[in-house]
Image (spheres, rainbow, N blue to C red):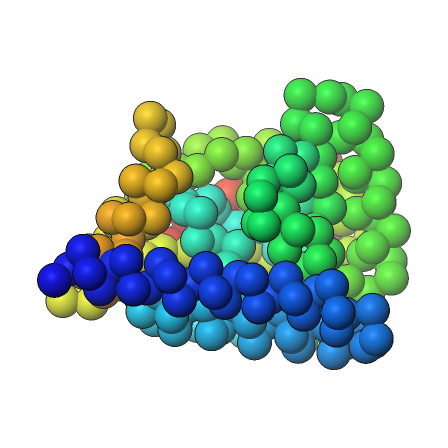
Amino acid sequence: MNAFRAAWKLVRAAAHALAGLRIIVFVFPRIDPRARQDHVQAWALHMLELLDIGLTLRGNPPPHGPVLLVANHISWLDILVIHAALYCRFVAKADVKHWPLIGRLATGAGTLYIERESRRDALRVVHHMAESLRAGDILAVFPEGTTGDGLTLLPFHANLLQAAISASAPAQPLALKFIDVASGQISHSPSYIGDETLLGSVWRTLSGPRTIAVVSFGQPEHAQGRDRRAWAAHLRGQVAQLIR
C-alpha cells in the first residue's frame, strides 16, 4: 500500500512539473515579474501538497529585497520548500541547468548558475548577484556547497557573501529541517548525502512517514565591517542556533 501511494504521488508530481513547464513557456512571456513570482510560489506550495509534505514557517520572511538568504542544505526538497515559503532567486551549480525538466523549471524561476570549480565564474556570479541585490531582489544561497545530515553544519564558503558586501545589502540566516509527524523527531527521509541516489531519496521520502518541512528565519544583518569570511562564520552560528 505504501508503494502504491508513493507511486501515485510521483505520478501527480510529474504531471504538476509538466504543468509548471507549460506555464513558463506560454504564460511567463505575457506577465510581469511579480506575477511570475506569485506563480512560482503557488506552484511550489501545490507541489508540497501533492507530495504530502507539510510546511511550517518560523520567524519573519523578508517582505522584499534586497536581501541574501543564507541557508543550510539537506535535501533535493530544499529549493522547493523555500520557494513555497517565499519567492527568491537561487544560486545553483551549473549542472542543474542541464537536468531534464528540473533545469528548465529552475531557469524559469530565475536561478543564477555557477561553475563551482571555476574561480573566474565565481567572480562573474558574484557580480551578477550584486547587480540583482541592487535591483531589490531576494537571493538565496547554500554556503555549505553540498548537502549535510540536517543536524550538523559543514563550514560555510564565504565567496558568495561578497555580493551582499559589494551591494551593501543585508544577509538573513535561514534554517531548514524536516520533522517526522508521528514522532516529532528529525526526519532523515528527505536526506540526500554521501552515496545516496536522487531516486532512492525521492522514493524513501514519498513512501516513508509523513514529514513537515520547518523553515526558520533569523534576523537580517549587514556585514558591519566584517570581511566575508568572518561574516560567513557568524552567519553559520546563527543558522546553527535556528536549527535547534
Q: Position of residue 112 (x, y in %)?
A: 73, 46
Confirm whether residue 199 shows in the render. yes
Task: Give me the residue at 87% from left, 62% from top.
Answer: 135
Which quarter of the figure has residue 127? top right
Residue drawn at point x = 29 percent, y = 64 percent: 8
The total number of labels drawn is 0
Q: 227 or 39, which lies in front?
A: 39
Judged left or right of residue 148, residue 91 is right
Name the residue: 45% across, 59% down.
14
**Foreground of the two, 142 or 226:** 142
Q: Is residue 228 visible?
A: no
* Image quadrant where one finds the C terminus: bottom left
Q: Nearer the viewer, residue 227 or 210?
A: 210
- Residue 201 position in % (x across, y down): 32, 43
**Can you say whether 217 is above or below 238 in the image?**
below
In this view of the protein, which residue sits in the foreground, 6 or 45?
6
Looking at the image, is 242 positioned above or below residue 165?
Answer: below
Image-based side of 118 in relation to 173, left or right: right
> Along the horizontal axis of the image, is 54 left or right of 225?
left
Counting from the top left corner in percent of width and height, residue 28 is at: 77, 70
Left or right? Give the position of 101 relative to 110: left
Across and down, in percent, residue 108 comes to 71, 58
Seen at 63% across and 55% down, the residue is 105
Question: Where 73 sits versus 87, above or below?
Answer: above
- Say which quadrant the N terminus sits in: bottom left
